[in-house]
Amino acid sequence: MRTLFSENILSPSPALVPRPNPFELLLPSSAPAATSPSASVQSSPRQHEWLTQYSQSQQRVESEEAAQSSYVSNGPRPQYARRKGNPRLFFMGLRKSGKSSVQKVVFQKMSPADTLFLEPTTRIETDSLQSFVTIETAEMPTQLSATLPTWDHHAIFSNVGAVIWVLDIQDEYLSSIASLIETAVLLVTHHPRITFEVFIHKTDGLSEEYKHDTFREVRQRVQDELSDLGHGDRSVSYYQTSIFDHSIFEAMSKVVQKLLPQLPAMETLLNKLCSTCRIQKAYLFDTGSKIYVATDASPTFLKDYEVCSDYVDVVADIKQIYGWQGHGRARAGGEEASAVGESMVTYDQSGDTYVYLREIDDHLSLLCVMGKGSSVDKRMLIDYNVGILQQALLQVFKV
C-alpha cells in the first residue's frame, strides 16, 4: 500500500553544481590564472575579507540612512520640544481675542480689570521675563498672517518653542478655527518640533454646560479638519482659560513645562521628597509669575493649586513691602550664608492640612501641601530633606 509519505515518492536530491564565487576579485593581471581552482583558492581569502568588510560597511550606512528617513517621515513626533536656550512663546489669534491681556496678567502682574484699556497690537511685540530662566514672549498682530507665501515664516518660527493660539469663546469662533487650522498645517509641515497650544479663552461668565459643550465642539472640529488634511497625528493641547481666575496660570504652567529640559530631573526630585516625607503634593513655583514649573506625580487638585498660588502671591507682596531679604549669618569657617526664607500656614478648618513654603532662590519657591503627621512631628526631617532638594535644584539649573 502506497501512502503519500512513502519514501519512493520523494524525488532524488539534485546534484551540486559548482558556482562562481561572487566575492572573488578578478584583476586584469590575474584573470587567466583565476580559471584554475587552485589559483582561485590561493588568491581569494584576502580579497574575500576585504569585500566582506566593504559590503558590511555599505549595508550599515544604508540601513542607518533608511532608519533615519523613515523616522522623520513616519515616526512619532516627540511630545515635549526639548530645545536648548530659553523658552520662547509666540501668541497668535484674531483681533480682540485676548493675546495681550494674557501676557500682561501672567508675566507683568497687571490687574485683569486694567486690560480693558490696552491698545490693539499693530506690530510684532516681544518681551521677556527675567526669572530662573528667561521666558521670552512675542505676539503676532492680526493684520499679519504667517501662512502667506510671501511671508518669511522661517525667520519667525526658527527659535520658537511653543505657539499659543488664543480663541475667544464668547465671539464667533468659526473664522478663528479656520485660521488656526492653516497655522497648524504650516507648523506641522515646516516646523514639526514646535508645540501647538490652544487657549479657549474668556470662559468666565459662561454656564458650565455651555462652556464644556463649546470646548468639546472646538476640539472636535479642529481634530476632524486636521484628520481630513492628513495631519490627524498632530498633537494639539487645549485649555479653558480666563484672566479672572487661576486657569490662565495653570495653562501657562503646563505650556512652559514642555519647554524645560530640566523637567524630568525636577519631577524626580519632587517625587522622592513626597515619598520620603509623606507630603501630599509638592509644587515648584516661579515666585514672580505664579507659574509652577514642576510638580510631583500625584493628582493635582484645583483647590490645592489655588491656595498655593495665592500663598505665593502673598509672600511676594510681603517681600516687596517689608524688604524680606536673605541676611548673612556667619559660618564656622568665617564664610557667610544667606538665611533661608520659609513659612507654614494652615487652611483647613480641622487644622490638619498645612502649606509649607521654602525659598529655593530669589525666583523659585517650593510649596508643599501636607496632611496630618507631616507638619510638626516630622519638621526636622522635612527641613533636612528640603535642604538637600534645594542644593540639588541649584545644581540642576547651574548645569
Image (cartoon, helix red, strand yellow):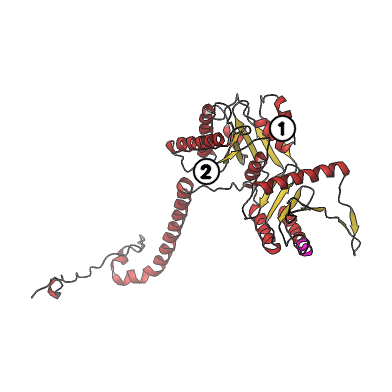
Give me the residue at 52% from left, 35% from top: 218
Q: Earlier in the sequence, mark 2 or mark 1?
A: 1
Q: Quadrant of residue 26?
A: bottom left
Image position of 352 with respect to 285: above or below: below
> Can I make out residue 359 in this image?
no
Magenta stretch encompasses residue 383:
yes
The label number, if any, that marks residue 112 in the structure image: 1
Across and down, in percent, residue 380 comes to 79, 64
Q: Judge from the rendering whether residue 277 lies leftward or rightward of residue 146; answer left or right.
A: right
Q: Amino acid at mark 1?
A: Pro
Residue holding disc 2: 235
Across and down, in percent, residue 167 comes to 58, 32
Give me the residue at 65% from left, 46% from top: 302
Q: Which quadrant does the N terminus fall into?
A: bottom left
Q: Amino acid at mark 2?
A: Ser
**Extent of the magenta region:** 377-384
Q: Which quadrant does the C terminus fall into?
A: bottom right
Q: Judge from the rendering whether residue 325 lies leftward or rightward of residue 195; answer left or right.
A: right
